[in-house]
Image (spheres, helix red, strand yellow):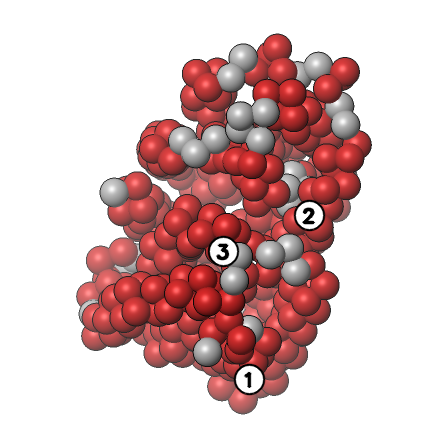
Amino acid sequence: MSVILKIGIGLITSKLLAIFVGPSGMALVGNLRNFLTSLESVSTLGFQSGIVKYVAENEKNKTELQKIIATVFITLLLLVIVLSGLLFFLASFWNNRIFGANFEFSLVFKILALALPWYAISIFLLAVINGLGKFKKVIWINCIGNTIGLLVSVLLILKFKTLGALLAVVISPALLFFVTFYFINKEIAFFDTIKFRFFDFRIIKDLSSYSLMALVSAVFGPLVFLAIRNNVIQTLGIDQAGYWETMTRISSYYLLFVSTLLSVYFLPKLSNSKTDQETKSIFWSYYKTILPVFIIGVTIIYFLRFFIIKLLFTAEFLPVESLFLGQLLGDVFKVCSLILGFQFLAKKMTVAFIISELLSLAVLYFSSLYFIRIFGIEGVVLAQAFDNFLYLMVLCVYFRKSLF
């Protein structure tokens, strides 16, 4: 229900964007979302998965739990203050880097500077609640946060069009802080926990491997997508980039089902598995239950693609139809590889994860440059499908003992 609500809200937002900002505005929103994803990971040091793991392991150990919460909170607070300063005072620089010199949206980065501390701390609090095993509360927080985000988006897009859409991207996540803070106080005495005497640098060291993995994926990934989109804008035009962003949004909605199940259900199981046989059982449970449903779902989506575009967007976005086959094929390969990729996180296989991730991003970037020259905008989704297939093959070989 939580995922369905999030998708429903996303569809409403997409329709508003299609009507009020068009393909060009959609491309700008895509650039900002990629930048925000990278910034989110930097501002939280990629600690989310590590926080969930260590909070879960020390739930009954009050002293250690206090050390974890206090250490991470103090570290992140100091970091986001520095990042906010860089965003605020270098707003024009970020505007030119993300949107280009032809657009003037420096205000967005100044607002983001003020919103970032609230956003980063809300992510931290949500990870703590998740680690405490309060899954229902995590779901409620997401539901409430998504609903607030919808209301903010509607008001800002109707009032300020493209500027409003960009402001909604940076303001909505920050409002989640007030929801997470309410729920965390029901679990622990939060203010009593945040004391400098509980700070323990050992915890930062323990979390560093998770940090490296998350930062490589969540920083370099969006930056590569940003670079690809800017290349599309320069070679094919901003409207073509908007069509790709539209296809990416559609893809993100149905992938939410899989990513949510993996994070909430399969990751803890993989973390607790002790033998190759246990891991194999988890892998094949995923392939026998989740994968067939996903394949059926994307097949239906392909045959309904014209209807989906007209329903969610406008007739102006009909060229997106040509991107469906490559995107859906690539997403099937991606869903096949996701469960294997989560094994890197579950077992803290830092070096292997970083090498595989960087190689995958390099393949994606250079293959997209090549395919765009040959196939135009369709080359982007073909490059993604090619990259996802190669990544899946590499992981199948690497985890062959656990898989077969």
Q: Residue 14: where, in percent of width, then height?
A: 35, 51
Query: Residue at position x 66%, y 16% from top?
Result: 194
Front label number (2 vs 1): 2
Q: Residue 165: where, in percent of width, then height?
A: 45, 42
Q: Is residue 253 above or below residue 394?
A: above
Front label number (3 vs 1): 3
Which residue is tagged 2?
A: 211
Query: Residue at position x 28%, y 64% from top?
Result: 289
Residue 273, label in figure: 3
Q: Of marks 2 and 1, which one's residue comes earlier in the chain?
A: 2
Callout 2 touching callout 1 (CB < 8 Å): no
Q: CA distance from mark 3 to mark 1?
A: 41 Å
Residue 371, label in figure: 1
Q: Amino acid at mark 2?
A: Ser
Q: Of marks 2 and 3, which one's residue comes earlier in the chain?
A: 2
Q: Residue furthest right?
A: 201
Marks counted in the figure total 3
Q: Residue furthest top?
A: 192
Residue 58's quadrant in the figure?
top right
Counting other residues with Cα less than 10 Å from the Cα at mark 1, is it few (<14), some (14-19), or many (20 or more)? Answer: some
Residue 364's quadrant in the figure?
bottom right
Residue 135 shows in the view: yes
Q: Amino acid at mark 1?
A: Phe
Front label number (2 vs 3): 3
Q: Residue 139: where, in percent of width, then height?
A: 35, 36
Query: Residue at position x 40%, y 62% from top?
Result: 282
Q: Is residue 386 above or below residue 332?
A: below
Callout 3 touching callout 1 (CB < 8 Å): no
Q: Say which quadrant the N terminus sits in.
A: top left
